[in-house]
């Protein structure tokens, strides 16, 4: 099989002779087409979002599995779900061929073992309620193939993301997302356009899934975790805006709710106690609009 991710790009065939400005212009021009290429896969991405949301809603977990750049992007997306959406570290996890060491330095040969892909999922207690998302620019990475094969063997749901339209991993997944971004600026350097495409898809996948689970009200991250001063200030602004309160009142509400923005807003808007606010949100499955939908911003 001829991999499009390995092709030589005629537009940058003599990039080694270009001036710095022309070199950057060439890279930028190639990058400009990535978002358009991703748009062609929106129906498949939507199916993937619904698959992930369904699993998480039922108490399952999402596992990103990849090697090299692809795996690191999965780890990044998983890590960001915690402060942004209040997800637990266990709910969205990233598995990288070669383990933690490979985050900072390439571990040669780690991606070449299908058995390690199966092993790493088993080690995390991966089960039928969970969903695995295999990420591989070429779509041929053995580590990812092993993980997807294991998911299939236990009838767990699976997603594959790649940048070759005829990649083997597509046939192994319930939902296959293939985006052809064309040959890289530097032939085979899939950390570039392919990596950008994968990042865009992962952004969509986790963000849309979390929105569907009630982690966002309007376009505000009302389930954020206050883990630093920047997020503390954001939480304060959210309560001031959504509860129409002053800074002192918002701070008191956040203190009373252990920095839970949604509970603080419900207490203020409905004039109810902490216990009552938590119960209202529980009955609404955590969707803030179901509790305060009679109030329009």
Image (cartoon, helix red, strand yellow):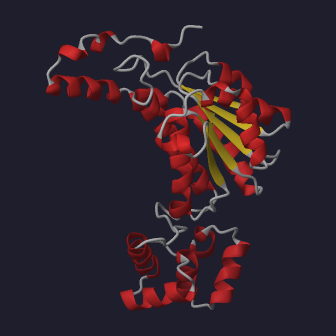
Figure quadrant of residue 273: bottom right
Specify the farthest residue to the right.
154
Identified at 59% across, 70% down, the residue is: 288
Residue 287 vertical position relative to residue 20 in the rendered view, above or below: below
Residue 86 vertical position relative to residue 148 in the rendered view, above or below: below
Judge whether residue 80 can be spotted in this image.
yes
Q: Nearer the viewer, residue 20 or 230?
A: 20
Residue 147 vertical position relative to residue 170 in the rendered view, above or below: below
State how many labels appear: 0
- Could you tell me residue 186's position as x and y percent? 35, 19
Q: Nearer the viewer, residue 47 or 244?
A: 47
Q: Is residue 16 left or right of residue 65?
A: left
Name the image quarter holding the C terminus.
Answer: bottom left
- Could you tell me residue 197's position as x and y percent? 46, 32
Identified at 66% across, 30% down, the residue is: 144
Q: Nearer the viewer, residue 157 or 246?
A: 157
């Amino acid at each position: 099989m001829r991999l499009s991710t390995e092709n030589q790009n005629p537009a940058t065939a003599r990039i080694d002779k270009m001036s710095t400005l022309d070199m950057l212009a060439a890279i930028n021009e190639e990058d400009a087409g990535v978002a358009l290429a991703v748009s062609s896969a929106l129906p498949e991405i939507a199916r993937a979002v619904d698959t992930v949301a369904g699993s998480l809603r039922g108490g399952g977990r999402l596992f990103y599995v990849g090697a090299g750049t692809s795996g690191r992007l999965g780890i990044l997306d998983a890590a960001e779900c915690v402060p942004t959406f209040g997800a637990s570290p266990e709910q969205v996890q990233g598995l990288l061929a070669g383990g933690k060491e490979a985050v900072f330095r390439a571990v040669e040969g780690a991606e070449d073992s299908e058995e390690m892909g199966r092993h790493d999922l088993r080690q995390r207690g991966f089960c039928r309620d969970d969903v695995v998302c295999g990420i591989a620019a070429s779509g041929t990475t053995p580590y990812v193939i092993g993980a997807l094969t294991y998911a299939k063997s236990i009838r767990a749901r699976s997603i594959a993301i790649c940048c070759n339209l005829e990649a083997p991993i597509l046939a192994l997944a319930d939902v296959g997302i293939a985006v052809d971004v064309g040959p890289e600026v530097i032939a085979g350097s899939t950390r570039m356009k392919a990596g950008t495409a994968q990042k865009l898809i992962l952004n969509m996948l986790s963000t849309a899934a979390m929105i569907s689970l009630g982690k966002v009200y309007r376009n505000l991250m009302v389930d954020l975790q206050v883990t630093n001063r920047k997020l503390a200030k954001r939480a304060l602004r959210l309560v001031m805006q959504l509860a129409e309160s002053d800074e002192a009142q918002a701070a008191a509400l956040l203190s009373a709710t252990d920095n839970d923005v949604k509970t603080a807003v419900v207490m203020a808007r409905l004039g109810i106690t902490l216990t009552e606010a938590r119960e209202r949100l529980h009955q609404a499955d955590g969707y803030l609009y179901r509790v305060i939908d009679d109030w329009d911003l």
